Every structure is written in structure tokens, then in C-alpha cells.
């Protein structure tokens, strides 16, 4: 077992210090600098037309993307967690409002999807990256972490090992992600009440230990899926504003207030 990590201080603290190997500007309003060529990922296409050749988004630059999506500000979000926890399904649920049952999806994987959200009158584009199979060997290309403005870290409430591995994922994230990356812990598959082995309280306890916002989700029923991405978008949007006119968005409070508890059968 790796030694316990200190509580996550990457957000909510207002600190803007960054790791020396990261960006030199606040991560939420500036794209992390990365001059290294983006490593090719097996079986995936290059980023679509919305993304410049260097693979980076340009927050603050309204654009007409491939899907005709105007936006004011854009961010990269990454889904991480063990293989099979439901990352691809979560992304498909959020983007298309559908659930992909069966096992084929876990081998296919997808690259990324864009979705533009209206956040308090501002068009916030999220470019959401799926880890497309690499998580099986926990070999997610480290450059991807560095580029991410937000990470959704998932475990599966029906799979204890995926929960136990969260600490290892946090070690990776702490090593390779931006210091002030927005990070949220999600316990997925709460619709599977019979198979549940990780209690909601266990997820809450772990999240508290590391200072992370936490929710339970279901890609199958859609529970809290939109909310998770909306919360991320709100936090990122506010961070990107140089002199926010509104009171500071409180991610933890928002998630606590708005999150729905699965209606049935706590173990
Ligand atoms: N019951 C249930 N099954 C899910 C949920 N999310 C994903 N799955 C199933 O779990 C398996 C793995 O999902 P997938 O999205 O491929 O996981 P990934 O490897 O993390 O991308 C698939 O068979 C999905 O249908 C969920 O919220 N509830
Ligand atoms: Mg997948």
C-alpha cells in the first residue's frame, strides 16, 4: 500500500501556486503549457476540428466548432478510474442522454466528446476525454493529466477493488496533474443496489479525507450525471473570470446541496 496522501489542496483554497513542471499561469484561465508532442494513443483519432493542431483549447476565444458550437470559454475534463467503472457510459450519458449496456463499450472506448453548457449566461465548452482503454494498465499518458483542467475520478460501488484503487489514482493525479486541477470523486452504478459493496458513507469518508467533492452517480439512470459536469463547468468558469462579479462559487456546497441520493436500499 502506498503511504497515505495529504488532503487535496488543489481547489477551494484559492491558492494559485503551480508545480514547476506545470503551467505558469492560473490553470483555470490558461491552458497548461505543453510543447511536447502529444503521444499517439492506440486506436484513437486525432482531436477534431475544434482543437488547434497542438491539441489545446483556447479559452476565451469564441469559435465555430465542427458541431457549430459557439462558446466563450473552453476546458478539458478527463475521466479517470479503473477499467469497467463506467467512464465511457458516463460520458455517453452526459453527451447523448443514452445508456450503453453490455460489455462491448469497455473495449471500444471513445476519445473525447464536446459539450457546450450554458452556465449563468456564459457558454462553457467542456472537452471531455475518456481514457480509452489505457486505464486497464493504469498507463494513462501522463501528458493528458497535465493538460486537464478538471478530473472526474470514478469508482464502481459494486466493485471494491475499484474503490481501493482510488488512492493509487490520487497518487498519479498528484504527481502529474496541475496543482489546482478541479477534482471530483464519483461512485458510479448506484442503480445496482443488490450488487453494491461500497457504502455511500465509505465514499463520503474517503472524499472528506482528501477534501474532494463527492457524489454517487448512475450512468444507467442518469442520476447526478449532468450535475457532476455542471458543477465542474461552474467552478471552471468562475476561476477563469479575472474579477468575478458574483460571489465565489462553492463547489463542495453546490454538490452537497444539489446531489440526489439513490432512492433505494442502502446496505
Ligand atoms: N448498472 C450499471 N452499469 C453500468 C453503469 N455504468 C456503466 N455500466 C456498465 O459497466 C460496464 C463498463 O462500463 P464502461 O463505461 O465501459 O466502463 P469504463 O471501462 O470505465 O469506460 C458496461 O457493461 C456498462 O454497461 C451504471 O451506472 N450502472
Ligand atoms: Mg471506457
Image (cartoon, grey):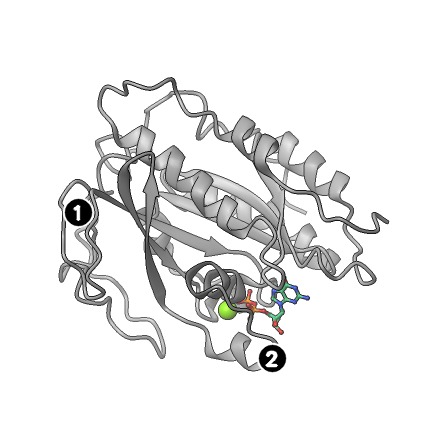
Q: Quadrant of residue 185?
A: top right
In terms of image quarters, where does ligand 1 lie?
bottom right
Q: Residue furthest bottom?
A: 104
For label 2, being within 8 Å of ligand 1 is answered yes
Q: Quadrant of residue 41?
A: bottom left
Vertical comparison of 211 with 40: above or below: above
Q: Position of residue 204 (x, y in %)?
A: 69, 37
Q: Residues within 10 Å of mark 2 (few under 14, many from 20)?
A: few
Q: Residue furthest front?
A: 121
Q: Which residue is mark 1?
A: 58
Q: Position of residue 12 (x, y in %)?
A: 45, 24
| Residue 71 appears left or right of 94 | left
- In space, the residues marked 1 and 2 are separated at their CA atoms by 36 Å
Q: Position of residue 76 (x, y in %)?
A: 32, 50
Name the residue at 23% across, 65% down. 67
Can residue 179 be seen? no
| Residue 109 appears left or right of 165 | left
Marks 1 and 2 in Cβ contact (< 8 Å): no
Q: Secondary structure at mark 1?
A: loop
Q: Position of residue 32 (x, y in %)?
A: 24, 42
Q: Secondary structure at mark 2?
A: loop
The front one of 122 and 238 is 122
For label 1, being within 8 Å of ligand 2 is answered no
| Residue 192 appears left or right of 257 | right
Q: Earlier in the sequence, mark 1 or mark 2?
A: 1
Q: Which residue is mark 2?
A: 103
Which label belongs to residue 199? Answer: none
Vertical comparison of 52 with 34: above or below: below
Amino acid at each position: 500500500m502506498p503511504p497515505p496522501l495529504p488532503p487535496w489542496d488543489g481547489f477551494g483554497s484559492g491558492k494559485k501556486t503551480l508545480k514547476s513542471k506545470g503551467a505558469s499561469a492560473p490553470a483555470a484561465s490558461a491552458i497548461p503549457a505543453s510543447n511536447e508532442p502529444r503521444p499517439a494513443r492506440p486506436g484513437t483519432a486525432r482531436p477534431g476540428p475544434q482543437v488547434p493542431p497542438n491539441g489545446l483549447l483556447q479559452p476565451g476565444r469564441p469559435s465555430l466548432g465542427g458541431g457549430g458550437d459557439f462558446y466563450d470559454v473552453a476546458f478539458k475534463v478527463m475521466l479517470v478510474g479503473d477499467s469497467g467503472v463506467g467512464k465511457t457510459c458516463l460520458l455517453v450519458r452526459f453527451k447523448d442522454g443514452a445508456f450503453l449496456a453490455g460489455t462491448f463499450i469497455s473495449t471500444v472506448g471513445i476519445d473525447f466528446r464536446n459539450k457546450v453548457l450554458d452556465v449563468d449566461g456564459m457558454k462553457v465548452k467542456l472537452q471531455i476525454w475518456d481514457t480509452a482503454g489505457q486505464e486497464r494498465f493504469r498507463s494513462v499518458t501522463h501528458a493528458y493529466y497535465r493538460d486537464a483542467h478538471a478530473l472526474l475520478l470514478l469508482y464502481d460501488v459494486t466493485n471494491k477493488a475499484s474503490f481501493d484503487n482510488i488512492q493509487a489514482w490520487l497518487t498519479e493525479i498528484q504527481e502529474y496533474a496541475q496543482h489546482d486541477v478541479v477534482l471530483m470523486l464519483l461512485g458510479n452504478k448506484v442503480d445496482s443496489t443488490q450488487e453494491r459493496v461500497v457504502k455511500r458513507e465509505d465514499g463520503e469518508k474517503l472524499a472528506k479525507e482528501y477534501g474532494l467533492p463527492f457524489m454517487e452517480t448512475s450512468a444507467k439512470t442518469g442520476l447526478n450525471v449532468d450535475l457532476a459536469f455542471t458543477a465542474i463547468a461552474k467552478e471552471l468558469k468562475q476561476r477563469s473570470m479575472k474579477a468575478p462579479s458574483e460571489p465565489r462559487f462553492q463547489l463542495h456546497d453546490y454538490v452537497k446541496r444539489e446531489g440526489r441520493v439513490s432512492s433505494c436500499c442502502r446496505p
